[in-house]
Image (spheres, rainbow, N blue to C red):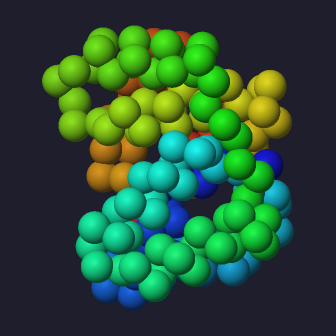
Amino acid sequence: MIFVDTGAWFASLIPTDPDHASATAWLAENSSPLLTTDYVIDETLTLLRARGERTRALLLGARFFRDGLAEIHKITEPDLELAWETFERFADKDWSFTDCTSRLLSSNSESLKLSRTIITSSNSAQFKSCLNGAGLARNEWRAIM
């Protein structure tokens, strides 16, 4: 199973996004099941709407909720507490709270059977480095940039 974060979903839908070609090519070639979170869906759909992409937001939402595009992991109370600790600990970084939930979920790859994480965030190398240094990241991080 492969965890897909906001940047990859967004890039796959927006032709003008710098990562669009990489994201769409990767998704087209992938045959492994995908996993995302309720927070990532919220962030992605909100970002699409905020950028004037209402139709794309509705189409992606339908693919998540009607078509089973990805398994949806719901963020739990313990996830939130750990994400808050990460958000607080790395307050000097430009990470969203959703980024913190995603990265902690990705670091819990064994219990979720994740083989890798697909991200496009410009903060990805920084996040990976910080979490690896804290002993938190265990699965393969792959940036499709």
Location of residue 1 with respect to 111 vertically, above or below: below
| Residue depicted at 51% across the width and 21% down the height | 80
Judge left or right: residue 52 versus residue 73: left
- Of residues 35 and 66, the one drawn nearer to the viewer in this rendering: 66
Toward the left, the furthest residue is 92
**Residue 93 sits in quarter:** top left
Q: Position of residue 48 (x, y in %)?
A: 38, 70
Judge left or right: residue 70 versus residue 32: left
| Residue depicted at 54% across the width and 26% down the height | 104
Location of residue 92 with respect to 28 vertically, above or below: above
Judge left or right: residue 23 versus residue 90: right
| Residue depicted at 28% across the width and 79% down the height | 52
Position of the C terminus by quadrant: bottom left
Residue 20 shows up from this direction? no
Location of residue 53 with respect to 11 vertically, above or below: below
Judge left or right: residue 129 versus residue 64: left
| Residue depicted at 32% across the width and 38% down the height | 96
